[in-house]
Image (cartoon, grey):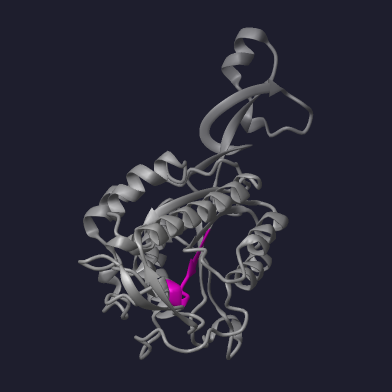
Amino acid sequence: MLPSSSASRPRGIDDLTDPALYAKLDRVDLASKKIFAGKLQGERRSKRRGQSVEFDDYRNYSPGDDLRFIDWNVYARFEKFFIKLFLEEEDLALHVAIDASASMNTGEPSKLLFAARLGLALAYVGLAKNNRVGMSVFGTPWSSTALNAPSSPISLLPDRRGRRQFSPAASFLLDAAWPSGRDDVSGRPVPGSDLNSALTTIARLRTGKGVMVVISDFLDPGGYERALRALGAVGGFDTYCMQVLSPGELDPASETERGLSGDVRLADIESGKAAQVTVTPALIKRYKQRLSDYTGALHRFCASRAMTHLVLRSDSELSEVTFDALRRHSVLR
């Protein structure tokens, strides 16, 4: 994989947002397939009955019921007491976990830049709808100060709520994925920052229930099975695995103007291991089949655990992704 020329640190929050897109995002909401009980009042209707203004049903009066909820119009007709029931509005917890490993800093445009923009857009939707939103960044090839540890592999933003928290969330993501003074992607990953270890830790740290969005290329030498098992074992998550791949990963022939062919030296950007190979049409065909098998296996693994998996190109227009792909996969509504 070739390092991206756009892998350097964005200049500011404006590089991660698009005002035109965000104006449209005010009209959408998270579309969890499950219904969870929230901690604070929000804008999401739940199946729990409470004290919102939206009427749901009646039930017979029982001694001790609040007399304020008796429907006196019904009493006037039937001379029986009935209690009015209402749908309760609750907030939904959203957690966005973004892979910032060296392999994500490849492609043109950078997979990490696309992942950050997508993750921030989802966070905006959650905050705009008064839901609890938390974020985490893992896999960076440098130490962070997250979790109150000098060499923690994970940067964590605790749950926030409300539109006013968007700017702090965006600043967190900018600093966590591209720490100041670290525009390069060199260096060995911090122990525990691999996909399996990081997501296992994130799963254990999460409290309550809600939507978990993991944005990664899922191209980790250790695989992804242990990570997704951990998310499934904790329970309470409606999990979406968004696999971001660059155009060159999907089609190596498009990696350069003349295509990837002939004798080339390929290096793993994370491990540093290199190999001399002769790229031929037959080799590219086998590569595409291997990639298809890999993404297919990930898709089936997710489906067997009631998780949603989708593949996204890093050069996709974010507006098309949010209003087409994410709606088709029931991430947004």
Question: Which percent across, then down, holds residue 122?
Answer: 41, 56
- Residue drawn where x is 36% and y is 91% of the image: 181
- Residue drawn where x is 42% and y is 69% of the image: 169
The mark total stands at 0
The image quadrant that residue 200 belongs to is bottom right
Q: Is residue 110 left or right of residue 126?
A: left
Q: Nearer the viewer, residue 76 or 49?
A: 49
In this view, the residue farthest toward the top is 77
Q: Nearer the viewer, residue 306 or 225?
A: 225
Q: Nearer the viewer, residue 291 or 118?
A: 291
- Residue drawn where x is 61% and y is 63% of the image: 224
Above or below 133: residue 146: below
Residue span colored magenta: 95-103
In this view, the residue farthest toward the right is 63
Q: Is residue 59 left or right of residue 240?
A: right
Above or below 176: residue 302: above
One can see residue 28 in this view: no
One can see residue 4 in this view: yes
Question: Which percent across, then down, holds residue 231?
Answer: 65, 58
The image quadrant that residue 66 belongs to is top right
The image quadrant that residue 107 belongs to is bottom left
Look at the image and say whether residue 117 sits in the magenta stretch: no
